[in-house]
Amino acid sequence: MVRTSMNRQRHASLGRRVGVGVAALLGGLLPPMVGADSATAQPNQQASFTNPGVFTFTVPGGPTVLNTVTIRVWGAGAGGGGGAGGGGGGGGGGGGNALLALGGGGGGGGGGGGGGAGGGGGGSGSFVKCTEVLAGGVTLTIVVGAGGSAGGAGTGGNGGAGGSGGGPFGGGPGSAGSSGSLGGAGQESTVGITTAVDLAFASGGDAGTRAPTGGRGGSGGAAGGLGGAGGFGGGGGAGGTITGSGGSGGGTTRCLGIPAAMLNGNNGNAGAVGNSGTAGGSGASRQSGTGGAGGIGGTGGSGGTGGSGGTGITVDGFAFGAGGNGGGGGTGGAGGAGGAGATSGGASAAGGSAGSAGDNGVAGGVGGNGAVVIDVTPIP
């Protein structure tokens, strides 16, 4: 490998000595081809490697031919974190019993579950552009990094059970949604004379973190009162408040030749918080012989949106290594309706409805693969 320019008068003699020496040295260092692909460059040819794996690349010409080799390397982007699940809705309260000539009060509606928080976006990979002077016949080893895996989504919470008609207890609360999981980091990409000696190196992005808080479950509605008083509606569950943070962009680059550009990756963005569920409606009271109607259940809160991944670096019309987006949080479940109160001397009180389960969160997106693009131009 030669990293200094030579004038025309010295090319022939010095090129023969250096080129032959480099080719002989590299021929002794190179392992057998281990990749699923390889390329032998032609004069003024551009070769691109955009799939993850290990490949080989042979510079054209004989050992006396010197070439300007421009190497562009992108590290892979990280995966986004998963969104948390929404909380389950609270169960509706059961209707109250009649008392003498008074109908029973309606049970209160269950509160809606809170929405889960969104996951953070993954960081993009870094970038390096190097210029080398290499003799023909030199074989390079290329490693293209794979994008990070997507973070898994959290599961929604279960809805609360409805209260029994005429019973002294209200509906049960919904359970909280679970957290999402972490995305995977992006892998580095390299070009070197072996896998251990790099000419160019670009690191992958850091993973976006998971959303650690699912939505809270909604409260259950109160039971209808004996002889006319309606039960209060349950309160809505709180949305997830701790979101996934964005992953950092890749920050490490190396160039053994002449560096033309060395750029850090872009950071991913944090996810958004989940929204709280609404409270359930109170049951209606009745003073006559008919029972009061049950209150309606509260609506579930919407989940927070996932953070966007770091954008891939664009150089010379190429863009690779973007971070994956974070997953959105799940919507909270609706609260169950309260049961109707008993009619005086007639039908018994109705039980409340169970709350709905919260929705699952959304998985994060996978990170973009790294890449290597090489241009070869013979030196006249």
Image (cartoon, rainbow, N blue to C red):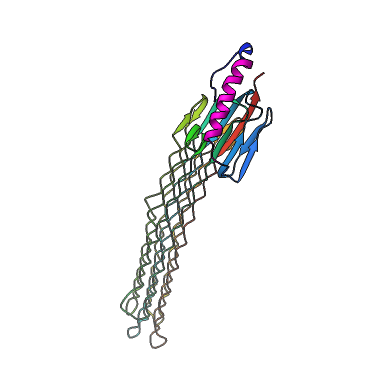
Please name the residue shown 53% across and 22% down the image.
3
**Is 17 included in the stretch rendered in magenta?**
yes
Return the x and y of residue 108 as percentages of the image width and height: 38, 70
Q: Nearer the viewer, residue 107 or 14?
A: 14
Vertical order, 168 against 117 (above or below)? below
Residue found at the far bottom of this picture? 345
Q: Nearer the viewer, residue 59 or 280?
A: 59
Q: Is residue 320 visible?
A: no
Return the x and y of residue 198 as percentages of the image width and height: 49, 33
Q: Nearer the viewer, residue 221 or 348?
A: 221
Residue 105 picture quarter? bottom left
**Is 326 included in the stretch rendered in magenta?**
no
Q: Nearer the viewer, residue 283 or 176?
A: 176
Residue 301 picture quarter? bottom left
Please name the residue shown 56% across and 42% down the image.
32
Q: Is residue 19 visible?
A: yes
Vertical order, 70 against 360 (above or below)? above
Give the magenta range: 11-31
Return the x and y of residue 24 as percentages of the image width and height: 56, 29
Q: Image quadrant for the C terminus?
A: top right
Return the x and y of residue 169 as percentages of the image width and height: 31, 76
